[in-house]
Amino acid sequence: MDVPLVPIGNSRGIRLPKALIAQCGFGDMVSLTVTDAGILLSPAKNERSRWEDALLASPGQPVADAGAFQEFNQVESGFDTSEWTWPQKP
């Protein structure tokens, strides 16, 4: 598929058809990689999504439960409950 380069300020960009965006699984962000063959666009990944794999692959680092990262995200501290005031929505 050939698409035109369109002016965007001092840069140029391309417009991707909606159907192609959906087919590729793109969200609001994409990962852009320059290869010998050209430019590769792929769905952007959450940077933290690889942390668990990296920890499990680390030598000498025992991990009792691979789900520990999910539990970590659910931990509240005293600061969360007593010292922090969450803004109220109008």
Image (cartoon, rainbow, N blue to C red):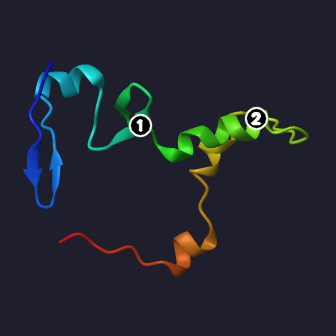
Q: Is residue 43 left or right of residue 1?
A: right
Q: Is residue 60 left or right of residue 35?
A: right
From the top left corner, tell me how far across and down residue 49 is, in percent: 54, 39
Density class for disc 1 (Cα within 10 Å; few <14, some 14-19, many ≥20) is: few
From the top left corner, tell me how far across and down residue 64 is, in percent: 82, 36
Q: Quadrant of residue 55?
A: top right
Residue pointed to by mark 2: 56
Please name whichever residue, 78 or 42, is drawn nearer the observer in this view of the structure: 42
Please name whichever residue, 17 or 10, is drawn nearer the observer in this view of the structure: 10
Residue pointed to by mark 1: 34
Element type where label 1 sits in the image: strand
| Amino acid type, residue under disc 1 in the picture | Val
Density class for disc 2 (Cα within 10 Å; few <14, some 14-19, many ≥20) is: some
User: Which quadrant, please, contains the C terminus?
Assistant: bottom left
Element type where label 2 sits in the image: helix
| Amino acid type, residue under disc 2 in the picture | Leu
